[in-house]
Amino acid sequence: MLKKLFVFILCVWFLASCGGEETVDLEAQGLVNYAGDRFDISIPENWNVLNEKQNLLPQPSEGKIELSAQSQEAKGGFFNNVLILSDTLKTFTDSQEFAIANNVGARSQYIDYLELENKSFDFIDGTSSQLYIFEAKYNMETPKIKFIQTAYVCNPNIGYLLTMAVSPSVKITDKYETLLSSFSCSPDGWDL
C-alpha cells in the first residue's frame, strides 16, 4: 500500500511539473527582442539590423521592409538573414491563407524553385500559418539559397511575410523556425 501511494505521489508530482507556462530566457539563448512599429520578434543578439537609411536594401515591388537583419559571419559562404515585409491586404484573410498565396507567388518570382517542405506552422502565441522551406535563385547570376518562409496577419488587414535565407548546406532548420515562431503583433501601435 505504501509503495502504491509513493508511486501515485510521484506520478502527480511529475504531471504537475509538466504543466504551467513555460518562460523563455532570450539572453540565455543568445537572442534579443526586436520591437518593430507593430510587431515583436526574437533575433540573434549578434546579428546586424540593416535599415533603409543605409541604402543597402532594395525596394520591394510590393509592401514595405519592416526588418532586415543578417549574421555577422558567413556560414557556408553565405550570411544568414531574416527579412520581414508588410503589406496592406486588399481582402481579409488569415495567416495560413496569406502564407499559401505568397508561396504561389514565390514559385513564379524565383528561378529554379524547389520545394523541400510544406507544413502547418504555429507561432508561439498560437496563431496558425503555413511554413515553406524551398531552394531557389534570385536571378541567373546568384547561387541557390535555402528559404524558410511563413506569414502572419495582424489587425486583420496587415500581412507580414517572414523569410529566413540560409546557406543550402543547412540541413536542420529548427532553430530558424523557432526564430520565426517568436513573431507576434504588438497590441500597441494599432489605430482601431
Image (cartoon, rainbow, N blue to C red):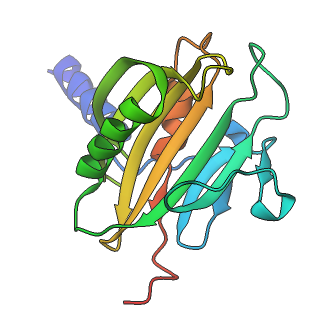
User: Measured from the top left, where is residue 18 in percent x and y?
Assistant: 35, 37
| Residue closest to the far front | 140
Reply above or below: 28 against 87. Answer: above
Looking at the image, which is closer to me, 108 or 18? 108
Image quadrant assignment for residue 78: top right
Front-lying residue, 89 or 109: 109
Q: How many marks?
A: 0
Q: Quadrant of the N terminus?
A: top left
Give x and y (percent) for residue 97.
Answer: 23, 49
Residue appearing at x 44%, y 22% in the figure: 134
- Report the residue that reaches farthest toward the left: 1
Where residue 123 sits: x, y (%)? 38, 47
Left or right of 58 in this view: 14: left
Q: Quadrant of the C terminus?
A: bottom left
Residue 120 as seen in the image, left or right of residue 123: left
The residue at 60%/31% (across/down) is 165
Residue at x 33% of width, y 67% of height:
89
Q: Is residue 169 left or right of residue 93?
A: right
Q: Is residue 12 above or below residue 146?
A: below
Q: Is residue 105 above or below residue 54?
A: above
The answer to whether any part of residue 31 appears in the image is no
User: How far across and how far down the image is residue 186, in percent?
Assistant: 49, 71
Residue positioned 26% across, 25% down in the render: 6
Report if residue 61 is visible in the image. Answer: yes
